[in-house]
Amino acid sequence: MMSIIVLLLMNIFIETSVSLTVLVPGDPVVAHVGSTVILPCWISPAQNAEALEIRWYRHDQFNNPVLLYNQGKIQDVQEKSYRGRSSLKPWSDQSGGLKDGDVSLRLEKLTLQDEGSFRCYVSGDREFDSKEVALKITESSGTWKAHFVSVLIVLVCLILGLVGLILYKYRDKLTGKKPAKESCEEEKAVVEEAEDIEGLKKYADVGESADIEKLRKYAVNVTIDREHKNPNLEVSRDGKSVKHAPGYKHTGKAFPYNLCAFGAKRFTPGRHYWEVELAVPPNPSKNYWLIGVMKDGNLTPRDRSALTPSAGFWFLCSDGPSGFHINTTPSVKLSLTPRPERLGVLLDYDDGQLSFYNVKERKHLLTIKTKFSGSVRALFSPGAGDQSELRILDCPKPAESAADSSQPLLSVVSRPEKT
């Protein structure tokens, strides 16, 4: 009799154990009245969810759900106020939907009453898990005010840029001196000034020669976090190399921003430098890659709209024939010639600068100016347009003298002009 009871208890424990895991954003999803929003939720590791039960509900309304998917279809059992307004919708265009474990909820015609938490519940035969997603609703008028302020700022910047351009064009007449002959390829690249929602001004400066040996005095050992990488990435055992998995097929036209991995080391105030090899023999130099930093604790990105400076991402991206760009708002395209085969990255946390260097050409490519808070990690993506891997190098770290440590790494660069 005792053995039968033990077997029954073990069976109950097995059937109620929670091994299925769902993931949701850590920050609230913000939308305004009358708009449509998607509340992200997906299964990790990714698996087909078509045969699972997917239930979205509010507070303790388990039996009165916002949406219930079961037995391969959406059931006609839901809270009255959400009829005709709720559906299952992939979080991004690159998501495979239910087949890839994307169980995100789409809500239309939002009202102020929709503000609050929504619970994503996923259940199989012997496993289940649930997480809450917070939704914050703003008045539509607030959105118009934000747009008005943004437009006003852009107009002011355009006027200042036009005045600066006129002064630059006629500087020889104003000063009585003829300008020196300039080369279009060696001249500083003109980059648009960008402004994010927090009002922090960011712009990129393009420099000339770089002292690589001086940069290597701040070299750090960077490896990739193997436990939290995208499942479609293949990372070497030493955590130094990454490429897309052999079976991965990129179906979209845009850069696969979801194929991202981040460094295992967390960076705090100070200077940190590392180098990445983009031409690993016998393969040619990579045409597709993404390298930068991200704020620690951010979820792995799933589409381009999530990779903004205000969301804690800063990077330089090479998108094959589409060229190079940095993820300022709006995005800024760059012309980098020759194409870097080895990229140096300097994170100057205290001065709020992320700089990139062409190591073989010993040139400073550009610097993104921002403001860091909390710890940050290195960010990598090998893209999906070529077979070459992306490899993090071990830099020799020369001994640093007291005189060297007191000198700035970058010369002061004047604010770029607009054309």
Image (spheres, rainbow, N blue to C red):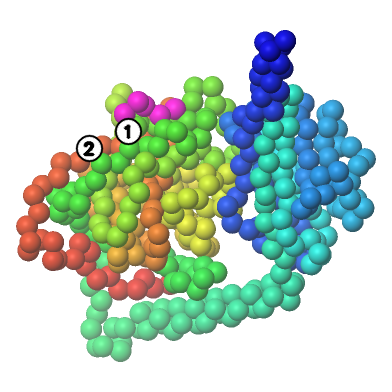
Which secondary structure lies at badge 2? Answer: loop
Specify the principal SS of the magenta part: loop
Which residue in the structure is indicated by mark 2?
A: 394
| Residue 195 in the image, given as x and y percentages of width and height | 50, 70
Magenta stretch, residue numbers? 234-238
Where on the picture, by quarter, is residue 22? top right
| Residue 29 in the image, given as x and y percentages of width and height | 65, 57
Compared across the picture, whether 269 is left or right of 3 comes to: left
The amino acid sitting under disc 2 is Asp
On-image quarter of the C terminus:
bottom left
Residue drawn where x is 35% and y is 79% of the image: 168
> Of 378 and 358, which appears nearest the observer?
378
Residue drawn where x is 78% and y is 40% of the image: 55
Query: Quick check: can you spot residue 224?
Result: yes
Asked if marks 2 and 1 touch (Cβ < 8 Å), the reply is yes
Confirm whether the magenta stretch covers residue 226.
Answer: no
| Residue 211 in the image, given as x and y percentages of width and height | 16, 54
> Of 205 and 309, which appears nearest the observer?
309
Compared across the picture, whether 254 is left or right of 209 comes to: right
Which residue in the structure is indicated by mark 1?
A: 240
The amino acid sitting under disc 1 is Lys
On-image quarter of the N terminus:
top right
Compared across the picture, whether 80 is left or right of 409 comes to: right
Residue drawn where x is 37% and y is 42% of the image: 263
Which secondary structure lies at badge 1? Answer: loop
Residue drawn where x is 49% and y is 25% of the image: 245
Above or below — where is 129 with respect to 181? above
